[in-house]
Amino acid sequence: MNRDKRITLGLILLTLFLIAALFAPLLAPYDPFDQQLKEGLAPPSAEHPLGQDKLGRDLLSRILYGARISLWVGVATVTISLTIGCLVGAMAGFFGGWLDELFMRLVDIFLAFPGILLAIALAAVLGPSLRNVIIALSVMGWVGYARLVRGQILVVRELDYVAAARALGAGPLRIITRHLFPNIAAPIIVEATFGIAGAIVTEASLSFLGLGVTPPTPSWGAMLSDGRSFLLLAPHLTAVPGLAIMSVVMALNLLGDGLRDRMDVKSR
């Protein structure tokens, strides 16, 4: 599949995901918290296209509302991580010296811990909640952006247009914001695309373990966890949220791959 087809397919799937998340209250056929205990574990039907969970709640409605959780976690985590990572990476790469050494050793410390294990530990200490999930993911997420930004700035800070800006009296803040960041934006955008996918998967993992959002808030990971006890009796309970997670992550990965190839000068 060439890059244009990957970008198009990724955008189509991602648009469907965004519509589901943003307009969940209008699209959901039922209240996602409404329980019909007598209809628990009911398979897909005309009234409930994706079936019902063990408490009789409509699975389609919960999937739509769960998309809002995934979207918020992905966007919020990447926004916070990107802000911190860009700030740290820009200062380390532009000024160098002891500041670069300090920040990069801090990055090395964070990289010494497996990301998912650090997120699990932080979520366990802070307690299960949406806010704490975002905090836990942001604490481990900024490191990759910091290394990427630092590496890019180390390359572009020696170019002629940066030297010309210095000669004209431009200060460090102006050089970084007006001359460096616009020229390193492409790899940052691509990395952010993959970062959103990673945040969605990690949030689902934490919710699966009971460290994510608190019940009865719909979360795709928690829905997977609830359905694992009924794999044979009601396979739709795990298949539906699993396919939802797979589709969104695939959409973001296709978009990221396509953008990376499009923005890569060597591939043209």
Image (cartoon, rainbow, N blue to C red):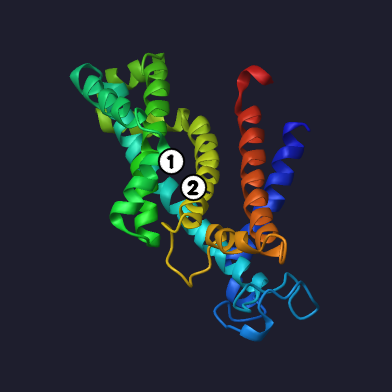
Q: CA distance from mark 2 to mark 1?
A: 7 Å
Mark 2, Cα crowd under 10 Å, few <14 / some 14-19 / many 20+, is many
Q: Position of residue 254 (x, y in %)?
A: 67, 39
Q: Position of residue 39 (x, y in %)?
A: 68, 82
Q: Position of residue 177 (x, y in %)?
A: 35, 34
Quadrant assignment for the C terminus: top right
Q: Nearer the viewer, residue 215 or 131?
A: 215
Q: Quadrant of residue 6?
A: top right
Q: Nearer the viewer, residue 237 or 4?
A: 237
Q: Position of residue 151 (x, y in %)?
A: 40, 21
Quadrant assignment for the N terminus: top right
Specify the amino acid type for callout 2: Thr
Specify the amino acid type for callout 1: Ile
Question: In the rendered image, which residue does mark 2 sit on?
Answer: 202
Q: Nearer the viewer, residue 249 or 167?
A: 249
Name the secondary structure under disc 2: helix
Mark 1, Cα crowd under 10 Å, few <14 / some 14-19 / many 20+, is some
Q: Which mark is residue 116?
A: 1
Q: Are marks 2 and 1 in contact (CB under 8 Å)?
A: yes
Which residue sits at x=53%, y=61%? 222
